[in-house]
Image (spheres, grey):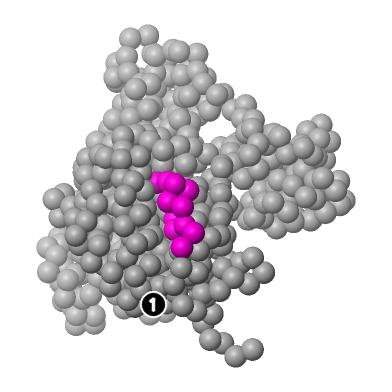
Amino acid sequence: MRVLTISVSEPGRAIAARLPYERRHGEPGAALAEHWGSVDGFVVVLALGATVRLIGPLLGDKASDPAVVCVDDAGAHAIAVVGGHGAGANALAREVAALLGAEPVITTATDVLGVPAFDLLAGLRAEGDVAGVTSALLAGEPVALDRRLDWPLPAPLLGSLGGPAASGARARVVVDDAVGAPGSGPSVTLRPPSLVVGLGTTSDATGDEACRAISAVLADAGLSELALGLVATIDRRAGHPAVEAVAERWRLPVRSFPAPALDAVEVPTPSEAVARAVGTRSVAEAAALAAAGPGGRLVVDKVVCGRVTVALARRAGPVGTLHVVGLGPGGPDRRTPEATRAVRDAEIVVGLAAYVEQSADLLTPAQDVRRFPIGAETERVRAALALAAEGRRVALVCSGDAGVYAMASPALELADEVGGLEICVVPGVTAGLAAGALLGAPLGHDFLALSLADLLTPWELIESRVRAAAETDLVLALYNPRSSRRTWQIEKARSILLEHRPAHTPVGIVTDAGRPGEAVRHTTLGELDCAWVTMTTCVIVGSSRTTIRSGRMVTPRGYER
């Protein structure tokens, strides 16, 4: 989201400066009017009543209005004013509250009562009488579920719905990609991204032609545009303006295939003329089937529309995705936008209970959240993989960086057990970098990261690495240095380091970086008191070049001054 913060008072200006958004101070009415329609959201540091009066004349409808969040001058509350779900105001209010240490104020009924909102279901689009069906759910009335497509649905939603003939149900939810006449009573149709467009074009085809052709083919087949999930073509057309126009109009990813791969796909209407031109007997049909994956089938054979050829295939089910997400060391201010998107877009969030709570401001009632105790690393990875293998969109959350002493490694090691998944590792700010920034610039030159946890690695191996590192004169970032049961390892590491480095070597100790209770301490190797160190501490030991400059720990790179 592109967010603009507007402040009026000096306390409001200070609050706005704490938020990572664009800022404007003064003349709030003019600022709102000027940017309404050009930004995704506003954070207005002003009284709620004044904010409502200012935005009243600008409001259009819920489909086009931006998110508006109001924050009081004390920074105590972040109130979602308009655009709760569709524009993301509820999520923005939670994010702002987390950044300020404020209380999010959400009044949307589904959020307050823990009922899944149809416009927040990951991977599904809702159309129909959303308000009517939601009202029935909120009132505790039975709501029927008619699954005309066997597409997985979020567990919280399934728990709220009955079967297709639910007793006494006047409202219903339909899962389908076909266009149909609504029945009696309120009804919502959920559109999964089940349809794949296979697209072939001549070199001079236009984007308008391609979009009109696809719309016409969908209409003739009685299929919904909201169910489009992917556009597929031959690799030589992947960047063609017609393909790009289709992808932009329906916000679809593009998947392309080389001619030999397409020629190997069995299709109902192959063409030798096409084979002579591009090296495969089919583009549209073959690309649609190839992208639809195992179990996919054509629902519309190729249709030639002037310079554009269109075919439609239906996927057998969704392709599972697993995002292994590094949340950073602490609060949302150290969390990357990519990590935020991955958690918000997930249908299921899996993680150590403490790490799930670290992303609590991103979670909604529509998400299935699986919390695991400490020590169940393999279990939580296998659970995340198994859920993704069912076609679910899963986020496996970790503290710090997912690839540094975290879950990315075991997830990729075990991925072959399920196969066929899209796995994405989302990086985060690791503890060593967060600690280094708080200390100054101790990692300004070559450094080495070591974990002192001997639960998974034999201490003999760790000790040999500590000795080797001590001899190299590299800065060391020591992870997992101490716990309630592992108290002697940091003492041993210190004694080894003192064999190779002088006692006055600078040492930085950072506990709970980016979290409440954050503590930063400068000392030396000789004066290091290991009682200061906990499991959530990162210890950074300097090299022979590391110095203290104006109270900051610095390892010079050697730039000329």
The boundaries of the magenta stretch are: 526-539
Q: Which residue is mark 1?
A: 473
Indicate left or right for 81 with 418 as reference.
right
Location of residue 308 by image quarter: bottom left
Q: Relative to 325, does residue 158 appear above or below in the rendering?
A: above
Q: Residue placed at 32% from the left, 18% from the top?
A: 162
Indicate left or right for 321 with 71 as reference.
left
Q: Estimate the x, y position of residue 14 in percent, counting from the top left.
A: 78, 50
Indicate left or right for 495 with 20 as reference.
left
Indicate left or right for 107 with 529 as reference.
right
Q: Residue placed at 46% from the left, 68% from the top?
A: 503
Q: Estimate the x, y position of residue 161 in percent, counting from the top left.
A: 36, 21
Q: Residue placed at 64% from the left, 32% from the top?
A: 103
- Inspect this view and state whether residue 196 appears: no
Give the amino acid at mark 1: Asp
Q: Residue placed at 49% from the left, 59% from the top?
A: 527
Q: Estimate the x, y position of residue 102 in percent, counting from the top left.
A: 65, 36
In reply to whether residue 527 is colored magenta, the answer given is yes
Judge by depth and name the residue closer to the eye, 180 or 84: 84
Name the outermost residue toward the bottom.
560
